[in-house]
Amino acid sequence: MSEDVSEVHKELLESVKDAVGRKVKLSLRRKVKLEIKGDKTENRVLALASHRTYLLTARIPAKVEHSFNYLEIQGIACNKPTQLFIEYERGSFSLKLLSTEEVNEVVAHIGNCLLRICPGLQPSKVMKKLCMEPPDRLISLQNLWENNKPAEPGPCGGFSQMYRCVCDWLGLPHKEEVQWDVDTIYLTQDTRELNLQDFSHLENRDLVAIIAVLEFNQWFTKLSTKDYKLSADVCEQILRVVSRSSRLEELVLDNAGLKTDFAQKLAAALAYNPSSGLTTINLANNPLEDRGISSLGAQFAKLRLGLKHLNFSKTSLSPKGVNSLCQSLSANPSIPSSLVHLDLSGNVLRGDDIQHFYHFLGQPNSLATLDLSNSDCSLDQVCSALLRGSVEHLSVLNVSKSVFPHRKGKEVPPSFKHFFSSTMSLSSINVSGTKLPPEALKALLLGLASNLNLKDASLDLSCCELRSGGSQILEGCIAEIPNISSLDISDNGLDSDLSTLLVWLAKNRSIRHLSLGKNFNNIKSKNLAPVLDSLVHMIQEEESPLTSLSLADSRLKSDLTIVLNALGSNSSLIRLDISGNAMGDMGAKMLAKALQINSKLKTVIWDRNNVSPQGLQDVAAALEKNFTIRFMPIPIIDASQALKASPEKTEDALLKIENYLYRNHETRKYLQEQAYRLQQGIVTTTTQQMIDRICVKVQDHLNSLRNSETDAILEDVRSAENLIKDARNSKTLLPNLYHLGSAAREEVNSSSVGPIQEKLESMAGEVTNVMDQQLQTLLESMVDAAESLCPHVMKRSSLRPELIKASSAKMVVPKSFVTKTLLEQSGVDIINKISEVKLSLASFLSDRIVDEILEALSTSQLTLADHLVRRGRPLVRQESVDLDAPEEKIPKRASTEMLEAERLEDLETCMVGSFVM
């Protein structure tokens, strides 16, 4: 063949273009010889496009005999200088070309196309098999491909180019929507997870093309879907990816309608792919049954990398299937050190035929999360196994709705308590829904109490049927447990036993979250008040560690207002769940009042309370004056009912609530003045009343000793009068301490704001200068990088200064931005914190000084009383107004307070008279 013979002449080329389609751009065309039988050959035209190879007849009109996508190639062999043998999925052919150079050119072109289609993969790997004789031909090609690697593969590992090629391979139209989603949304999120739910609105054949890309893509490492039934062809494509991809690490097909046969095929796919990187498998909520799981288990025993995350929740496993699975897991020496998450919840783990399961848990392992919930597993046997193998790493243990087999009078196995006293990393323990006998509960609590390794553990004891016996165990243990930060004892029929239990819970210094819901259903109204009083006392305690309280689904109705009334002065709770209490509009009104003065709560959950549009309006109005609530989910159930009654009023309230929450997220405000006023009110109405009462008593004694002439008595009288002066001045002690340094009370925190604002303003200038220097350095680095990457265009001498000058205008950060950020955000947060500490300090000093005054007044009263007794004088009391008015009966406590108030008025007059004397 001469040179002109290998080139395709114009007329034939036009016919070739007609045959393959005018839209297809052919980048290489060669006349070749197709080997038929023996030494027979026929003329053909080999045409190469960006994604596909065509072999056509060499006559006009040309016809396509073979056509295949580059991704279909199963092997290329060049065992003779001018021979080219290509095998693809649907056939093969052998060609003779003009020269060795032409053969190399064709293979090089295919390789270069594969480099663009599958960045990150060697062309020889995509071709499956590539043989060239002599071997230096292949080395030359590999060097060529290495030099031709694209500098930037494109978004998400070049997904779009790959997807277009896969669609060509499968004969499907490519969807620009898919390309845009991956190139834009996925790239922006920087996610390595391809979620089929993002494309669930497309046809199954479109999903097949998307999944097929993962066979070659080097960016995505996770394929997931949930609650979406997968068709047979989609499942087949997933299995193909598993059998071929070395990049896929996580496969999540939760509730995808998979059956036993899929699990068996997945096992075969894993067996076919020895270089598989799959370490996370989640097939939860698919009825795979024992046969499917056993097939997978047999393959798990051979996985080179082991497994990290295995979720077979609700897969219709019997004890036999679980036993078989765990036997396979134990057989793989990598799995005990690699598996950190195991979920077998919702399967049947009841019975004695699961010794391999206990053996697996009992061998040293790296499990951090173990979920056996709703499986009827034996809690004592599980803990006994975990004691042997899982005390070091286990962090989350969920054995809710398990079984604790225990006979009365029989001791709890020591291993049960020993596990909880020995575990080193446990942070979450869930035994919810497990009927725990008192002895087991005691062993659990005492085990935790003696464990010095744990801190901030969460313990869920809800629905454990604890009742009075369990309450007594809790009372005896809970105060001394230092490592529980969250305790859920809801739905345990505790009822009136809560009254005492709450007293002991209040003594615990580590519990920050407490759930008490569903414990008030059978409590009598006369017993409810003491329980709620104990709860109020607990949350109002000055040093209470409690930050989160749930009373969800307690049906407290109007009695909930007792708790709501205590929220106004609460200084510890930041989260409150009062949903499901049917408190009605009166409860909403009380909640609104509490929110107007509470400056600590950040989260309030309050749905299912039978609140009308008016109740929603009341809470919305309260939020206008509250700047700390950040999270208040829309009460959907109540709102849906309210919308039926008054759509406009309800929509208005919900919109206001949303706007005020948004405001609280976006703006900063000085908050501590409100807390100060509340603290001042509390002091005035509590401690100060005690001082006033004892002052009245001391003044009564002074009046009785007024005409005494003995020096000792006069000295004690003068001392008592001075103490009464101090007592009177102590009324203003808190405000004076709190506003110390302020020019006027209206200046919020002025003693703190001034120097801090001044410092922040000076810092703003410094920060702006640092930012400018950093941006200038960054600009220089960017231009340097551009010069190294594009030296030819950047060599023009004037280009660098031009670029720097033009870019300087783009990198200006106004000083006002920095000042505003520091003062209005960080500054306000700092000042609020200082003011909070300042209020705490002022309150502490005020309380201590008032305590000293009370003690001194009491001592003075006793001294004066002793003088009266020695002189035989009667105690002269100030006359007071007769309160026995027939038309209005005043309660005893109120009448006493009014009497004291009347006598206090006389006290001022008496003191003035004594000072004049």
Image (cartoon, grey):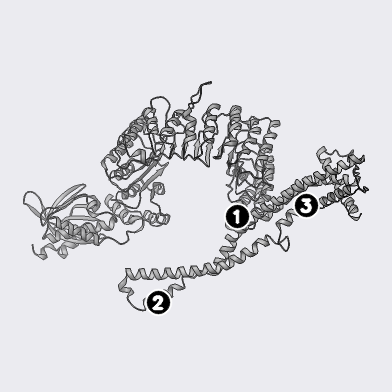
Residue 585 in view of the camera: no
Compared across the picture, whether 901 is left or right of 266 comes to: right
Q: Secondary structure at mark 3?
A: helix
At horizontal 54% and vertical 26% (from top left) the residue drawn is 439
Q: Residue 788's spot in the image, x, y percent? A: 32, 69
At horizontal 58% and vertical 41% (from top left) the residue drawn is 511
Q: Nearer the viewer, residue 695 or 567?
A: 695
Q: Which amino acid lies under the numbered mark 2 shown in the image of this protein? A: Glu
Compared across the picture, whether 696 is left or right of 816 comes to: right
State the image quarter where residue 235 is shown: top left
Q: Residue furthest front?
A: 711
Which comes before the other along the chain, label 1 or label 2? Answer: 1
Q: Residue 29's spot in the image, x, y percent? A: 18, 61
Residue 226 in view of the camera: yes
* Residue ID for mark 3: 731
* Residue ID for mark 2: 802
Q: Which mark is residue 664?
A: 1
Q: Residue 333's spot in the image, x, y percent? A: 32, 37
Q: Which amino acid lies under the numbered mark 3 shown in the image of this protein? A: Lys
Q: Residue furthest bottom?
A: 798
Q: Quadrant of the N terminus?
A: bottom left
Which comes before the other along the chain, label 2 or label 3? Answer: 3
Q: Nearer the viewer, residue 228 or 146?
A: 146
Q: Which amino acid lies under the numbered mark 1 shown in the image of this protein? A: Asn
Q: Secondary structure at mark 1?
A: helix
